[in-house]
Amino acid sequence: MLVVEDEVKIRDLVRRYLEREGLAVVTTGSGADGLSILERGGIDLVVLDLNLPDVAGETIAVEVAGRVPIVMLTAKSGESERIHGLELGADDYLTKPFSPRELVLRVQAVLRRSATSAVAAAVTSFGNGRLVIDEVRHEVSLEGTSVELTPTEWSLLTVLASSPGRVFSRAELINRIRGYEFDGYERTVDSHIKNLRRKVEADPHEPVVVETVLGAGYRLGLSRDRS
């Protein structure tokens, strides 16, 4: 795991709390060094500050989103800034000042979502083969083309696909993918859904994969194919 944070006290605090949970942690205060470490591979998650002295955290997020889970840790606390961070591919977003214990819980939740399922499951297809989800390989394909999803996008899609046609409220989606309550997070689900749609709804003439049900939530718009 990598922590990219230029404030030494915060960097050391985050490292200590993560290491107490048995996580191996590498730290740096430089965005450029962070990118270099990420390019070498072997990092399963990055805790990323956005206000870095050299390379902007947003630039790092764009470079690694979809390949490495991202938990943003920043003083940028406005709603538009949080939504922007999620649109860049972050899997979670925590503002300063923050609770180190809450950060640990969020990191653990993202790691759980990004882990490949150890339980064997059949490949499931939807919409006459248009959408295919392979939970064992942690892969999604749309019309035969592989689609890279962040851990949060993957979790959202698989929850919706677990009951095609059923409407899931924002609160229910949060509980299913986070595993705990988090006040004020419901609207950020919309940002993750927006990112997911960009990846699985390439053709506007085809049926909608993720449908919005006004005042209720979201549902998968494709039927499960019979095996």
Image (cartoon, helix red, strand yellow):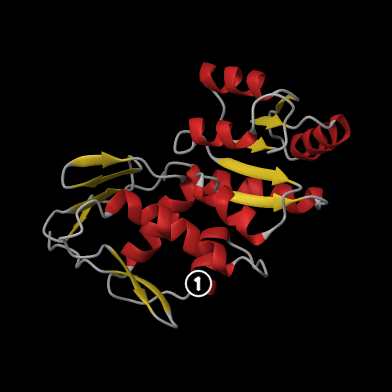
* Image location (x, y in percent) of residue 218: 39, 72
Amino acid identity at mark 1 = Arg
Q: Quadrant of the C terminus?
A: bottom left
Q: Which residue is mark 1?
A: 170
Identify the residue at image location x=41%, y=51%.
154
Q: Residue furthest right?
A: 9
**Crowd tier of the residue under label 1, counting other residues whose Cα lies within 10 Å: few below 14, some 14–19, many 20 or above:** some
Q: Quadrant of residue 52?
A: top right
Residue 161 image offset from top left, x and y in percent: 31, 63
Q: Quadrant of residue 107?
A: top right
24 to the left or right of 223 = right
Farthest bottom residue?
215
Q: Is residue 19 left or right of residue 137?
A: right
Residue at x-position 59% and y-position 17%:
36
> How far from the left and from the top, in percent, is residue 114?
49, 43
Percent x, y of residue 216: 43, 81
Q: Quadrant of the N terminus?
A: top right
Q: Residue at 16% across / 42% down in the picture?
A: 144
Asked if 37 appears above or below 216 in the picture, the reply is: above
Q: Nearer the viewer, residue 9 or 21?
A: 9
